[in-house]
Amino acid sequence: MAYSFPEEVLEHVFSFLSSDRDRNAVSLVCKSWYDIERWCRRRIFVGNCYAVSPEIVIRRFPELRAVEMKGKPHFADFNLVPEGWGAYAYPWIAAMAEAYPFLEEIKLKRMVVTDESLELISKSYKNFKVLVLTSCEGFTTDGLASIAANCRHLRELDLRESEVEDLSGHWLSHFPDSCTSLVSLNMSCLGSEVSFSALERLVARSPNLRTLRLNRAVPLERLANLIRRAPQLVELGTGAYSAEIRSDTFSNLADAFSACKQLKTLSGFWDVVPSYLPAMYSVCSGITSLNLSYAAIPSSDLVKLINQCQNLQRLWVLDYIEDSGLDALAASCKGLQELRVFPSDPFGAEPNVPLTEQGLVSVSEGCPKLESVLYFCRQMSNAALIAIAKNRPNFIRFRLCIIDPQAPDYLTLEPLDTGFGAIVENCKELRRLSMTGLLTDRVFKYIGSHAKKLEMLSVAFAGDSDLGLHHVLSGCDSLRKLEIRDCPFGDKALLANAAKLETMRSLWMSSCFVSFGACKLLAQKMPRLNVEVIDERGPPESRPEGCSVERVYVYRTVDSRQRLDRPDFVWTLDEDSSLRYS
Amino acid sequence: MEKRGAGLETELRLGLPGGEVEKNEKKRVFEEFDGCEDKAAVHKNQVVGWPPVAAFRRKNSFNGGKMYVKVSMDGAPFLRKVDLSMHKGYSELVRALEDLFGCFGIGEALKEDEENNEFVPIYEDKDGDWMLLGDVPWEMFANSCKRLRMMKRADANGVGLHAKDLLKGFSKED
């Protein structure tokens, strides 16, 4: 080019790019664009904290304001990742405290966060605004007290589904009277009672509060006063939704709800007394998202509530809703986009409620916008799956869990291959799939042939041979995350598709047939992959050649050093495949 | 795991007389529970981490999360209570039980009864049956256990483990 835009102009143009993909593309154009872009990037998302090191991030992006990161693999939610595996936030927090004095946002998922980290956050960033800890652990309410006390401009404190050691509710009282900036507070995962007067005062002095999710310890009698002080709320999570049945409590609550004209999302509802549900009816027509997945409410009361929520887009509920309730949902909520049905008695051998595949079929028939499903049930048939697939070719997420993991089609006793095959064939935009039931290599053939947009696949107790795994790795062009447990997949498919693994974020295989030798070979072949053998039985070499490893976790990384924070049950293998363990 | 579907060795033993007894430095009451948490079970629905309900959701489910059950020990003058939701597996529970009852002379019981120097941990399940601890995955046990009993091994000998026999002499008072 004879001339080029001045840097400031390019920077201004780039400032309109918010998607990571666009910014990554921009930085590939030429060296000067790379350089300009990296100085003006303000937000990053790191999908796997071990894919890169804090030093590399800081070196490339010196002026970040927001960092979002994920740690443990998804199967950690089901206790398949041993305690102490890793995903420690502290090294990141410490490095960023030095490098980014103007950092405003930290969002972490499935990471180990200590009180030390929280204290460091609270003291290092003058303008800290947003802390979201999803499914994290390792900290106590003392750490929360530091955040409350020191972050003068805090806007969001969201602890969704984290495991917090709850020493007391006193942390909430650490918010100074001068703190009026809160927009979002989610303390639903905490056990102890906070001071109700401190909570009321905090809510009252936070005019921008949009999201308030209380914990179970906040009794229903207190709810009215709280929401009265925040009629501008958009998202509300109640505490325990039970009280003695008294008309004054009821009318007080109903009045308070009726003042909340902006309410769109409701959650909480522990220990529900159904007679109090009608107190909410005045807001129901505006509700788009309802999370009743902790609420034991009989089907008839659920139906009455759902019939009030004509504009519902998202519903999370327990299987107490029954097939009949799902029929009602299909009839009332034509705008429904997402449905999750959780099991009320996951370990019971027999069904405890009349909820079957029929409920899902009804909803797929009646709700034209339904695109995301998570469904636990006890029986399924190919016919039902085929009907669902034909009804709803617009699915983007389909997660089915049959309680008995190898249940065949209950009508024909055949595998559910054709049913899931129909799903991937019809739903061309499918991005996420979880399968259960009796499944052979055939279903993987269908997936490899049709699921071209599939990004995440979860498989358990399925398949007959390596061919199954091979179909998926060779056929699914968009695959980013693959997690497998208890399947007869092994070395051949893994090694034959080694190159594919570098195009993915990660592969998890536990209780399969992968040998240590294959892991070594894979690590040798693919230097930009970390191959972690997670095995609690001692050094893998101490076992016979063909013995399978307990778990293997493979992920791409630009950090060429081996993990320094490995526990003694994680073996990683470097290029010359010499065994390294701490 | 070894070949799927094959019978799997577990390290649980009844420790009946004549069987192997591990001699360890520290005499622990329930040695057979060390490290056997993740043995895949023979039956497909007795498996770790299945069904895939997130641990957080299980803990905070509508029925309260806390799971206090009574624990009695043969020979002890009063019962204790233990919260099953606080423990992640059998070995943790067993350690907690030993802590709870340490003062009731487990040591003495061991001396008296040199050969049968262990207690048999049993529990009453949802159906009212008395079951030996450790057969099913932890989560399944925790969800169906109503009460625990540490039975003197001597009482288990020659009795086969029929529920009604175990209840002989066991107070039905709550």
Image (cartoon, coloured by chain):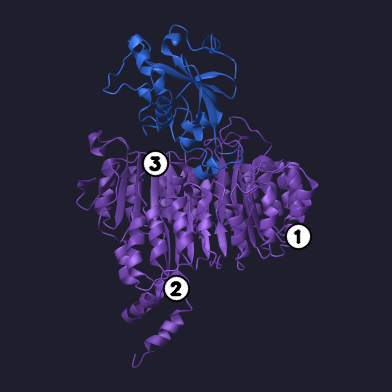
In the rendered image, residue A38, in percent from the top left (x then y), is placed at 36, 75
Q: CA distance from mark 1 to mark 3?
A: 51 Å
Name which residue type carries label 1. Answer: Ser
Which residue type does callout 3 highlight? Answer: Ser
Residue A80 visible (yes or no): yes
Q: Is residue B45 visible?
A: no
Q: Nearer the viewer, residue A66 or A212?
A: A212
Q: Is residue A425 left or right of residue A301?
A: left
- Chain letter of the residue beneath label 1 in the structure image: A
For residue A510, which numbered disc appears in the image?
Answer: 3
- Whether tag 1 and tag 3 are in contact, CB under 8 A, the answer is no
**Circles 1 and 3 on the same subunit:** yes
Question: Mark 2 highlights which residue?
Answer: A22
Identify the hue of chain B.
blue
For label 1, the residue is A258
Element marked by disc 3? strand
Q: Chain of mark 3?
A: A
Q: Is residue A429 left or right of residue A574?
A: right
**Extreme bottom residue here?**
A2
Quarter of the image where the N terminus of chain B is located: top left
Mark 2 vs mark 1: which is more N-terminal?
Answer: 2
Q: Earlier in the sequence, mark 1 or mark 3?
A: 1
Q: Nearer the viewer, mark 1 or mark 3?
A: 1
